[in-house]
Amino acid sequence: MTDFLEDYVSESDSSERYPVLPLRDIVIFPHMVTPLFVGRPRSIQALEWAMENERQIFLVTQRDPKTDDPEVEDLYEIGTLGQVVQMLKLPDGTVKVLVEGKIRARAQHYDFTEDCLFSELETLDDEVVDSTEQEALMRSVGTAFESYAGLSKKIPPELVTSVSSIEEPGRLADSLVAHLNVQIPDKQKILEEFAPLVRLEELLQLIEREVEILQIEKKIRGRVKNQMERSQKEYYLNEQMRAIQKELGEKDEFKQELRELEEKIKKSRMSKESNDKAMAELRKLKMMSPMSAEATVVRNYVDWLVALPWKKGTRDQIDINQAEEILEEDHYGLDKVKERILEYLAVQALVKKIKGPILCLVGPPGVGKTSLGRSIARAMGRKFLRVSLGGVRDEAEIRGHRRTYIGAMPGKVIQGLRKVGVKNPVFLLDEVDKMSTDFRGDPSSALLEVLDPEQNHTFGDHFLDVDYDLSSVMFVATANSLAAIPGPLRDRMEVIRLEGYTEDEKIGIAEKYLLPKQVENHGLKSTQVRFSTAGVREIIQRYTREAGVRNLEREIANICRKVAREVVKSADEKRRFSIGAPQIKKYLGVPRYSYGVKETDKRIGLTNGLAWTEVGGELLTVEASVVPGQGKLTVTGKLGEVMRESAQAAISYVRSRWSTLGLEKDFYSKVDLHIHVPEGATPKDGPSAGITMAVALTSALTGHCVDQDLAMTGEITLRGRVLAIGGLKEKLLAAKRAGITRVLIPAENEKNLEEVPKTILAHLDVVPVSHMDQVLTEAVPGCFTEEADQEQVGYPVNAQDTVHH
């Protein structure tokens, strides 16, 4: 570098020197007139020096256009000696100048004096050759340039005409190369060539190369245009890019993604059918444009196939004792469910492969059905997945949409398995009884295949269009009402009923789970606030009325919030709060419910019945009145169709027993009967209030009172038989809660007493009955005449007919 500077830089002044103007991204040829914008101070100084003298300036191109302050080694050796035709200073300090190239020149010595670069030059003339080869070259160049101009569409026609009139070979080469779209080194190479014939040969090569490139571009545009759909500009641009990449043979990112996708397919361990399908779709994807709509659909489909857990699963925790501890730790009671899970684990320990059980937990809200599913997963060491089916009315939500639809996706089952990432989770289908049906299909019917152990190993999702094995999944469904689940679906599930909690069970749940949880959630310490058992019992009896514990937890949280406010307000963290029964009213206000409500006095026509609701059992009071009339029966209290029919059956039975009850034969035509069930805003239905309405009518017609410590439940027939009912445990809980001491139940339900906690039966005298005459004997003593008593009123009275518990 030092030798180069010594050769070309001189500190001495020279009489024949010219200012130097370094150029970026342009090469000036002789006879070429070009406007330039100059902004560098040294270059502006060179222009001003030239304007003050003979306007001559040396135009030389930089090797690197990014260099702002070029030195000697940054400039080419050969440039063009030109003349400044016009110069204009702009307001921003830059200069616009018009220069004309005159002759080639070689820099001899550079000089940095006077704030600009000067150089001594050696001018270079073209060699003069007149031959037939020269004429042939000039014609070839002219013809090639005409072809270039026809393809480029950037060359004006008048330029082609003016070029054809040039007779000098060197000038022809200089004029044409300036209009070619070639690189700066190529143009500089032409400038440095002094022999016109050689210069024309190199120019001809450049023109032919550019013509070939333009022809390829034209071919690409033509092919893309044929593939383009009308008015799809974006599609046209993408296809043009694809065609360019195909011509250049470049490997783009899309191809790399396809290779990665192929590797994922090989590693996914999917079934042979699915693997063949995925590879077929991948081959189809390789033939598509990466930005086309169809490619997006195919890519999404392959991504779903790859992302599913075909073989990946978790190992079941077979330790029965540990699983039992986890279940006991999370939930109070629920022995049947816990026993079923432990049985499954025991079989799993003996058999390597067993089809997953399909359980259906049925019970009122708040008894822990959903949280129990999470505990099952924890006890088995499996991942947990919950999908809510409440309000689902489209069959495609279960089986997925076909790929022909825009935005199609798999159903909730496949989506859930991709989300959880294993093939054997505990899959909770929440609120399975809340699904509905419309014109889009029946989702409950779509669940038949999912929940059938004999079919779900080849479950077919419409989106995937290949079989997927669901036999390793443990499905757990939850519902509030079994009646709302279609029969075929109910038949595929193992139903486990979760009845409402007793009062003692609620107290145990509150003390073991709810109280510590809410105290911690509200930033309190167990030493700051203490709930007594009497206080919890007061909340259960007078501020909640439910089968579960959801509202109980809500009321405990309400008290904790108020305690937290008092702690912050007093700024005394050592203050202790004891929440007993007297303090509950202070925090929760006036009691919402009356505990143990029943009529204290015996009244004619008033009877206590027992009803089952989704929130547990309820004490149902039935009133009957008799007024003079013409035999009209009125039933009020927002009763359903079944309950109205029970009232008709009850009055028909009473009419058939007119003689044994001491009534006139035509009594019915002289009076109007009115049956009313209070709380008229609450809908009521079902057959279990039949004997209750019959007893109320008998009491009102005979004038005998009904014992208010007695409650009853049972369906009545026209012949007086008492049929079985459901929800016995909840009804007996409601009877105990209301302070009832004796309960009449159908004899067919006596076997269900084993499911009722002994703590409940200890407070109740349960009397099984099989006939309505027996009910009247127990409920309305003295209603039968003496003759009827002697005839034993239609049923055999002996010691075995009345069983007291």
Image (cartoon, rainbow, N blue to C red):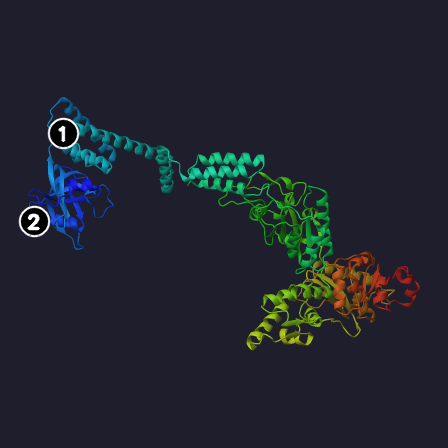
Residue in view at x 16 percent, y 27 percent: 197
Residue 52's disc is 2
In the displayed structure, 159 sits above or below 335; it is: above
Q: CA distance from mark 1 to mark 2?
A: 35 Å
Confirm whether residue 717 shows in the render.
no
Q: Residues within 10 Å of mark 1 (few under 14, many from 20)?
A: many
Q: Is residue 137 left or right of residue 730?
A: left
Q: Is residue 190 left or right of residue 552?
A: left
Position in image of residue 191 (x %, y %):
17, 35
Q: Is residue 234 left or right of residue 551?
A: left
Helix or strand or loop: what does disc 2 sit on?
helix
Helix or strand or loop: what does disc 1 sit on?
helix
Confirm whether residue 125 shows in the render.
yes
Position in image of residue 52 (x %, y %):
7, 49
Q: Earlier in the sequence, mark 1 or mark 2?
A: 2
Q: Residue furthest top?
A: 132
To which residue does mark 1 refer? 169
Front residue of 513/748: it is 513
In the displayed structure, 658 sits above or below 152; it is: below
Which quadrant holds the C terminus?
A: bottom right
Q: Amino acid at mark 2?
A: Glu
